[in-house]
Amino acid sequence: MPKYHPKIYSQALGFLLGQAKNPASQEKTIDNFLLLVKKNRDQKCLKKTLFFTEKFLLKKFGLNKFTVASARELSVGQKKAIGAAIKEEGRLDWQIEPKLIAGLKITKNYNQELNLSFSHLLGKLFN
Amino acid sequence: MSFAIIEKLKKAIADYKDDANWQEVGSVVEVGDGIIKVMGLDNLMNQEVVLVESGGKAVLALALNLEEDSVGCLLLEETEAVKAGDSVKRTKQILSIAVGNEILGRVVSPLGSPLDGQGEIFQEKSETVFQALENKAPSVLDRESVKKPLHTGVKVIDSMIPVGRGQRELIIGDRQIGKTALAIDTIIHQQFDNPDNPIICIYVAVGQKESKIAKIIETLRQNNALGYSVVVSAPASSPAAMWYLAPFAGAAIGEYFRDRGKDVLVVYDDLTKHAWAYRQISLLLKRPPGREAYPGDIFYLHSRLLERAAKMSLEKGGGSLTALPIIETQLGDVTSYIPTNVISITDGQIYLESDLFYQGVRPALSIGLSVSRVGSAAQTKAMKKVAGKLRLLLAQFRELQAFVQFSSDVDETTKKRIKQGQTLTEILKQNDLSPMPFEKQVAVLYAALNGHFDNLELNQVKSAEEKLLEHLETFSQEILEEIKTTGDLVESTEQGLKKAITNFMSKQ
């Protein structure tokens, strides 16, 4: 059993990062946080903590995170065009999923999905 | 052949309309023992169906545990392909089953898929309704009191523990004691009670051996009862999710017909296994265990199921849903957790005792411990008249029986009472798969209670009963018809019956 739930770690970390004034103090906050987690022997929770922290910060600053998955590596021009089409502010992450066959799958904030892939189209046609 | 396939493909592509929209998704973080934990899907509803995209296939799951940062879901189909990382999508629909008239005569799974190898249940043009498995019970104002009898065809039940349409009557006893046999006899009897419009019967098999379910289906088919019945099957080899959902599926099918003004009978065989399945699912979902490791809401599981049995008011169609839940006890212990829960929910119980069974009294009904809370309100006038003093006579006989064991010297009156009690016990014995119409029951009980069989030896009583019924069918059919149509035993009919019985007995 972890000493603290990953959500509690994430809320604390998210709050402090939100208050940090510059990148140097952010780095120091993160270093101290990692020391604390090591002291509590809760390293196993780090992955979940990172996930919750990201969600917490995105919500706090009203940002959206988009993950764009494609079947093949996209060119710089294609990435620029996709970024321009997604008109909202936020980070864009790029993933390669060959099982999409073609097209794109866009995930917003890990809980909403727009599936424009060829494999999805085939599934809808024949199921 | 290949051109036909190509043309089909072209048509499918041409007719396809893409409506790409944002969809809510989550991902599987844990999977095991038929349970998955999903992260994301913050707006999921309780009991909503979700689709797990696993290996190119969509697997159904049911959201049961809505936690702060994850959702515990119960997998409803094969679980081997599902793995951590699979995406999960909402359907925004509560779990429901397709119901229509075509479902009669079929064997289905709790999700509505056919299991009898007779192809799809519903054609494209069929009128089907999707009935939610979890549904609210009818309110007080939508109901009326239980007055119409549901004849089981079993003498001891119809005379002393009468069941009405819309009632819940529990059948409780140890294993291999005749609980399912009583339920099957009741189902078979409905075709004789009202041949033009028999009560629709739904038999829900929870956690039973497939061989036993197959035997029950064959019995119903051979006795021409399958045509107005539906069997919902969740055999022992199916996952706990199916055991959990089967009674709700049976209730949902019953509600479809009830809400259309029909009378329905649902047999839940048995709710003990249903409770075990719910306990298993709750423990896997890490819900806190209570008494005997059952979850805290085990009472609510059965109460919300059984409260759906009702007699609807005329404004709501006048239909009814009668429930016959079955509970298996261990060594006759009715005071344990699940039996006491269900006894407190139902409107009476039919308690089957092992001792009686091994003494040869079958059905092995304990008249002292069995009760129907609806009582004679759900009996025809004829049966009320005839069987009114039956329970009292048998209670007196039981007391005297105990007395006689200690003293062999008894007076004539006591000897007579004992003989009468023994005769009545013989009369109330009935073979399985031999339900008797209520008018014949009235005739037989009238003869027994008015001393017409008193001069017979005990081993002659059964054959005398059979011969009496043959005689009445041959020479006094109009008396039986009169009782059947009016439901009453008026003075003239009674005189005619008495004359016919006296005539018959004088020739014995």
Image: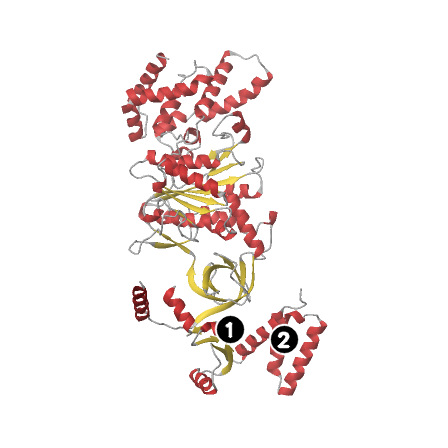
Q: For residue B23, which quarter of the picture?
A: bottom left
- Tell me the element at label 2: helix
Q: For residue A9, which quarter of the picture?
A: bottom right
Task: Using the rendered image of the protein, determine whether residue B157 is visible from the camera's viewpoint.
Answer: yes
Q: Name the residue under label 2.
A: A12
Q: Residue B323: horizontal and vertical position, in percent?
A: 43, 42
Give the residue at x 34% y 17%.
B501
- Tell me the element at label 1: loop
The crowd level at tag 2 (other Cα within 10 Å; few <14, some 14-19, many 20+) is some
| Amino acid, disc 1 | Tyr
The chain under label 1 reads A
C-alpha distance separating marks 1 and 2: 21 Å
| Amino acid, disc 2 | Ala
Q: Residue B34: horizontal and vertical position, in percent?
A: 53, 56
Q: Residue B312: horizontal and vertical position, in percent?
A: 36, 45
Q: Nearer the viewer, residue B488 or B38?
A: B38
Q: Which of B307 and B8 is in front in this view?
A: B8
Q: Nearer the viewer, residue B186 or A8?
A: B186
Give the residue at x 61% y 81%.
A17
Q: Mark 1 points at which residue?
A: A110
